[in-house]
Image (cartoon, grey):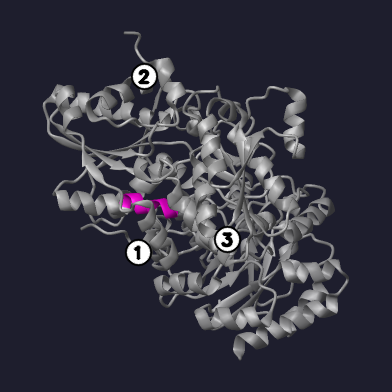
C-alpha cells in the first residue's frame, strides 16, 4: 500500500540557477512590500519560502488531515480512453479530484490553516477564481477551527452559485469582488459597476482586508513557493505509485494557472532528473488557456502578484498586472502571472508550454468523460487536450509510451459551463 | 583577505552621513572589512534603510555615479570590498569599474551576478584575476546546492549569504538552518552572512551555526540617520565582541 509522504519536496536547491528573489517596487522611495509579508502570512510559511533545505517535514496534524481528505489519491489507468484513441500509449491519471472539495487545492490549504492556527491566527482571508481554492480554504478553516472570508471574482460569483454554497456550508463568508469593502474594490467598481473581477483584484482586496484586521492572515492558493512545496505530495505519491506499476512516465501533463497542481506533480520528477537520478527523457508539459497565455506569449520579468501592487514583485512569465483576461470558464487559468519556480523551469527549457482554446478543452474533456465516467474541471480539461494530442502522436508513430496526467479537479460544480459545450444531438 | 572571523561593515559611497573619520572609528572598534556600496538607482535587494542611503548618495553625486568610484580611496581601511550590482557595472563597462577601483579594494562583490547573470561568472572571474583581486560571491537562501559547490571550487575569499529577502528587513526565517546547509556545502570556504543583522545575540547564534563572518549595514545607517554616530561605533564594537566570544 502506497502511503502518504512524510516530507514535502523543495526543488529550489536542485535547480540549475538561483530562483530570483522577490523585489520591492523599483522606485527608491516606494513603501516596502517585503516588510509587509509577516503581517500577511504565518511565520512558518515565510520560513518555508526561504528555506535552503531540500526536504520539509510534514507536521503530524497535517499528515492526519491528508489521510482524512483521502490521501494518497488514486493513480488510475485510463484504458478505455486509450482504446478509443487507438493509441499504444498508456495513460495514467493522478486523481486529485477525489479531494472533498474536488481539487488538489486542500493539499496546501490545510497546511496553511494549520500553521496559521499554531501561531494564534483566528481568521483566514483569501481570493478565489473558479471557487476551487476558496472551497479548499473554507474547508481547511473549518477543519482547523478558523473563520474564513473569501473574495470571489464577480464573474465566478455569478456563474458558480454552488461553489459559493459549498463555501457557505463550510461556514465561510463569500464576497463578490470587486467589492465595496476595500479601497481597491471601490476603485474598480467606480470604473465599471459590472466589473467581472480578476484574481489580481481579488488578491488585492484580500490583502487590504488582512492588513486592516487583527489576528487575520492571508491564504494563498498558488504562485508562492510554499504552496507548490505543499503540493509536491501529488508528485511524490505519483512517483511511488508508478514505480509500483512498473512504469516510468514519458510525458507528464498538468494545467497551469498559478502553477501549483502542475508544480506539485512535476517537481519531484524534475528534481530527480536534476540530481541525475532518472527521468532524463521525461517530457513535462504545462497547459494554459489561450485566454491568458502567459507561458506562450508573456514576458519573463518582475511584476506585481496583485493588481494593486500591495505584494512584492516576483520574476515570472506574465501579461502585466493590469491584464484583464476574458471571462473564460476555466477561471482558475485566468491569472496574469505564474509561479517563479515554474517560470524558471520554462525559461531553462525543463518544461514545455502549450495553450488551448476552451472549445477544444471541453471537447477533449467530453471525449474522456464518455468512456471513463470522469468529468474534469474546465481547468483540467485543458490538460486533457494535451493528453489527447500526445496520445495521437503515439498513435501516428505506433510507439509505446506512458502519459501521466494530473487530474487536478472534477467539474461537478461547473455543469453550467458544460451545458454550453454539449453537442446538440 | 585575512581569514578567520570577520566583521564587515557596509556603507554607501557618497552618502553624506558616512564620514571618513567615522569609518576610522569603525576600523578601530573591530570592523575587519569595509564594504563600500556603489549606489545604483536599481536597488534590487535593498530594503528601505539602504534605499534611503542610496537616494542620499545619488543626490550628492547628482547622478554621476562613476565619480563616486574615486571616493573608494578616501576611506582608510586595510581591507575593502566594492559592492555594486552587476547589471549596473556591466552597463557602465566592467573594465571601467575595475580600472577605477581595483587598486583600492581587495575584491568586487556583485550581489546579482549568480542570480541574474550566472552565465557571466567566468567573465567576473577573469576580470578579477586580471586585476589581481580576490573572488567573492553573494548567494540568496534559494541558491542551488550545486552552484554553491561550484563557486566554492573557485576558492573565493568568502561567500556572502543573504539571510533575508532584502537588506535590513527582518523576516521570520530560520537563519541558523540555512547557514548550516550552506556552510556544509562550502566546506573550508569562509561564509559571511548578512541582511537584518543588528544584535550581538544574532551574531552569536549565526557564528554557532557555522558563519565565519557577519555583515552589518542597515542597522548602522539607521543610527546615523537618527544622529546616533556614537551608538553606531558601540554597535560595531559589541558585534565584534559577540563574534569572538
Q: Is residue A230 magenta?
A: yes
Residue B110 position within the rendered picture, expressed as x and y whole percent measured from the top left = 57, 58
Quarter holding the N terminus of chain A?
Answer: bottom left
Label 1: which residue? A6
Answer whether labels 3 and 1 touch (C-beta < 8 Å): no
Label 1 crowd (10 A; few <14 / some 14-19 / many >=20): some
Answer whether labels 2 and 3 touch (C-beta < 8 Å): no
Reading the chain from its start, which is encountered first: label 3 or label 1?
1
Reading the chain from its start, which is encountered first: label 2 or label 3?
3
Which chain does the residue under circle 2 lie in? A
Residue A203 position within the rendered picture, expressed as x and y whole percent measured from the top left = 62, 41
Answer yes or no: is residue A21 visible: yes
Q: Residue furthest right?
A: B227
Left or right: residue B123 compared with residue A219: left
What is the C-alpha distance between the residues marked 2 and 3?
40 Å
Q: Which residues are magenta?
A: A229-235
Which chain does the residue under circle 1 lie in? A
Quarter holding the C terminus of chain A?
Answer: top left
Question: Which one is closest to the eye, mark 2 or mark 3?
Answer: 3
Q: Nearer the viewer, residue A226 or B100?
A: A226
The correct choice, above or below, for B57 with respect to B106 in the image is: above
Q: Please identify the dominant SS of the magenta region.
A: helix
Label 2 crowd (10 A; few <14 / some 14-19 / many >=20): some
Residue A326 position within the rendered picture, expressed as x and y whole percent measured from the top left = 55, 22
Residue occupying the point 46% across, 22% down: A416
Q: Check residue A360 in the rendering and tell me which mark sits there, or answer none.
A: 2
Left or right: residue B194 compared with residue A292: right
Left or right: residue A20 compared with residue B32: left
Answer yes or no: is residue A357 visible: no
Left or right: residue A345 compared with residue B221: left
Amino acid at each position: 500500500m502506497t502511503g502518504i509522504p512524510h516530507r514535502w519536496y523543495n526543488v529550489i536547491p536542485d535547480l540549475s540557477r538561483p530562483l530570483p528573489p522577490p523585489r520591492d517596487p523599483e522606485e527608491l522611495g516606494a513603501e516596502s512590500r517585503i516588510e509587509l509579508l509577516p503581517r500577511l502570512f504565518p511565520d512558518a510559511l515565510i520560513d518555508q519560502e526561504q528555506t535552503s533545505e531540500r526536504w520539509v517535514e510534514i507536521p503530524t496534524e497535517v499528515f492526519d488531515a491528508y489521510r482524512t481528505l483521502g490521501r494518497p489519491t488514486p493513480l488510475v489507468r485510463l484504458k478505455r480512453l486509450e482504446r478509443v484513441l487507438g493509441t499504444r500509449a498508456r495513460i495514467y491519471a493522478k486523481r486529485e479530484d477525489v479531494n472533498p472539495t474536488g481539487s488538489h487545492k486542500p493539499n496546501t490549504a490545510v497546511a496553511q490553516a494549520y500553521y496559521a492556527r499554531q501561531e494564534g491566527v483566528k481568521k483566514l482571508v483569501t481570493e478565489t477564481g473558479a471557487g476551487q481554492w476558496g472551497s479548499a480554504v473554507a474547508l481547511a478553516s473549518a477543519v482547523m477551527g478558523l473563520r474564513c472570508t473569501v473574495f470571489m471574482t464577480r464573474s465566478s460569483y455569478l456563474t458558480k452559485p454552488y461553489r459559493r454554497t459549498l463555501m457557505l456550508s463550510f461556514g465561510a463568508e463569500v464576497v463578490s469582488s470587486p467589492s465595496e469593502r476595500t479601497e481597491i474594490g471601490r476603485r474598480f467598481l467606480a470604473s465599471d459597476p459590472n466589473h467581472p473581477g480578476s484574481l489580481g483584484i481579488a488578491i488585492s482586496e484580500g490583502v487590504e482586508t488582512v492588513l486592516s484586521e487583527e489576528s487575520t492572515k492571508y491564504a494563498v492558493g498558488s504562485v508562492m513557493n510554499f504552496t507548490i512545496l505543499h503540493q509536491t505530495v501529488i508528485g511524490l505519491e505519483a512517483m511511488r505509485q508508478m514505480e509500483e506499476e512498473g512504469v516510468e512516465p514519458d510525458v507528464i501533463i498538468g494545467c497551469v494557472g498559478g502553477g501549483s497542481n502542475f508544480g506539485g506533480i512535476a517537481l519531484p520528477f524534475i528534481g530527480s532528473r536534476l540530481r541525475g537520478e532518472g527521468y532524463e527523457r521525461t517530457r513535462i508539459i504545462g497547459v494554459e488557456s489561450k485566454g491568458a497565455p502567459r507561458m506562450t506569449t508573456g514576458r519573463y520579468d518582475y511584476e506585481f502578484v496583485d493588481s494593486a501592487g500591495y505584494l512584492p514583485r516576483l520574476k515570472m512569465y506574465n501579461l502585466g498586472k493590469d491584464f484583464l483576461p476574458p471571462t473564460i470558464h476555466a477561471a482558475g487559468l485566468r491569472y496574469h502571472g505564474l509561479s517563479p519556480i515554474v517560470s524558471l523551469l520554462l525559461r531553462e527549457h525543463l518544461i514545455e508550454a502549450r495553450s488551448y482554446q476552451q472549445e477544444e478543452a471541453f471537447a477533449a474533456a467530453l471525449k474522456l468523460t464518455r468512456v471513463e465516467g470522469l468529468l474534469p474541471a474546465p481547468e483540467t480539461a485543458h490538460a486533457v487536450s494535451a493528453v489527447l494530442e500526445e496520445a495521437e502522436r503515439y498513435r501516428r508513430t505506433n510507439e509505446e509510451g506512458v502519459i501521466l496526467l494530473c487530474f487536478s479537479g472534477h467539474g461537478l460544480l461547473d455543469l453550467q459551463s458544460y451545458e454550453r459545450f454539449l453537442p446538440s444531438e | 583577505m585575512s581569514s578567520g572571523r570577520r566583521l564587515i561593515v557596509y556603507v554607501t559611497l557618497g552618502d553624506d552621513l558616512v564620514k571618513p573619520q567615522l569609518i576610522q572609528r569603525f576600523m578601530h572598534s573591530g570592523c575587519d572589512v569595509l564594504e563600500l556600496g556603489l549606489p545604483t538607482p536599481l536597488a534590487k535587494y535593498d530594503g528601505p534603510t539602504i534605499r534611503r542611503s542610496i537616494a542620499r548618495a545619488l543626490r550628492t553625486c547628482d547622478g554621476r555615479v562613476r565619480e563616486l568610484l574615486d571616493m573608494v580611496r578616501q576611506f582608510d581601511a586595510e581591507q575593502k570590498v566594492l559592492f555594486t550590482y552587476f547589471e549596473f557595472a556591466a552597463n557602465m563597462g566592467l573594465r571601467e569599474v575595475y580600472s577605477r577601483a581595483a587598486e583600492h579594494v581587495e575584491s568586487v562583490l556583485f550581489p546579482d551576478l549568480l542570480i541574474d547573470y550566472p552565465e557571466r561568472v567566468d567573465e567576473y572571474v577573469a576580470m578579477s584575476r586580471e586585476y589581481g583581486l580576490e573572488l567573492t560571491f553573494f548567494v540568496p537562501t534559494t541558491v542551488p546546492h550545486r552552484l554553491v559547490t561550484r563557486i566554492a571550487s573557485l576558492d573565493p575569499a568568502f561567500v556572502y549569504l543573504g539571510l533575508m529577502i532584502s537588506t535590513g528587513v527582518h523576516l521570520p526565517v530560520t537563519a541558523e538552518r540555512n547557514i548550516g546547509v550552506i556552510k556544509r556545502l562550502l566546506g573550508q570556504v569562509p561564509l559571511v552572512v548578512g541582511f537584518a543583522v543588528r544584535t550581538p545575540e544574532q551574531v552569536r547564534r549565526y557564528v554557532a551555526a557555522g558563519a565565519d563572518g557577519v555583515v552589518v549595514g542597515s542597522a548602522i545607517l539607521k543610527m546615523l540617520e537618527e544622529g546616533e554616530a556614537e551608538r553606531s561605533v558601540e554597535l560595531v564594537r559589541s558585534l565584534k565582541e559577540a563574534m569572538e566570544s
